[in-house]
Amino acid sequence: MHRTTKATTLIASLGIAVLAFAGCASTATDSPAPDETVTVDSAPIEEAPAEATFEDSVLTTEDVTITITDTKTIQVGEPGNEYGDVPVIAFWYDITNTGADRDVTPNDFIFYFNAFQDNDPNAENELNVGALPDDQFLDSQMENIKEGGTVSNAVAYELTDTTTPVKLVASTDLGQTEIGSMTINLG
């Protein structure tokens, strides 16, 4: 009977590894001659996706472009806030599906924007989304936008006071990373 010791196993393993590496090594390290043509197969370089931006009231992302066309404060009882208990700030906008690989609706605005009023000394004051401020969009606010198509819509946020400015913050990750903002002075 033949006994295998740890040392024998280690030496055998090292020997196999040396032979394997020797087989993988290339003995030719020649470079192509200056007059030789070398062909290299490669995949085409894809364009890097454009960075999302929010400038001059226009949010541009890989999937959508949202252009804010109007902003208005609406008091309780006024048209656009007939049923609310608090004043709202309303935004009218155009949203374009620029090639999203998912359904895009006019209400997607709320996935890209959060509104804040800095009137609490202890915590961030994120405003709640209010009722639709424009009845003309009742039937169109949930329709799917075709690629390249643009649809208008409106959204409102409930104000906690009517004097503190509202900061509208854009992001592409549900408010986790700010890519831009605009401040709306009330009053």
Image: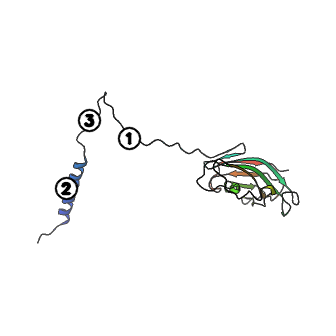
Q: Residue furthest bottom?
A: 1
Q: What residue did someone put label 3 on?
A: 30
In this rendering, position of residue 83 left or right of residue 125:
right
Q: From the image, state whether disc 3 or disc 1 is nearer to you.
A: 1
- Distance between the Cα atoms at labels 2 and 1? 37 Å
| Local SS, label 2 | helix
- Classify 10 Å Cα crowding around label 3: few (below 14), some (14-19), many (20 and above): few
- Distance between the Cα atoms at labels 3 and 1? 20 Å
Write the residue at 25% across / 43% down.
26
Query: Could you say which is closer to the camera, residue 119 or residue 25?
Result: 25
Write the residue at 72% across / 45% down.
57
Residue type (three-letter) at the residue carrying disc 3: Asp
The answer to whether mark 2 and mark 3 are in CB contact below 8 A is no
Q: From the image, state whether disc 2 or disc 3 is nearer to you.
A: 3
Task: Look at the picture and state if 181 lies above or below 80.
Answer: above
Task: Indicate which disc, 3 or 1, sits on the residue closer to the N terminus.
Answer: 3
In this rendering, position of residue 53 left or right of residue 122:
left
Q: Residue furthest top?
A: 35
Query: Could you say which is closer to the camera, residue 83 or residue 75?
Result: 83
Q: What residue did someone put label 2 on?
A: 15
- Distance between the Cα atoms at labels 2 and 3? 29 Å
Q: How many marks?
A: 3
Task: Look at the picture and state if 42 lies above or below 187.
Answer: above
Task: Indicate which disc, 2 or 3, sits on the residue closer to the N terminus.
Answer: 2
In this rendering, position of residue 34 left or right of residue 105:
left
Q: What residue did someone put label 1 on?
A: 41
Task: Indicate which disc, 2 or 1, sits on the residue closer to the N terminus.
Answer: 2
In this rendering, position of residue 48 left or right of residue 182:
left
Residue type (three-letter) at the residue carrying disc 1: Asp
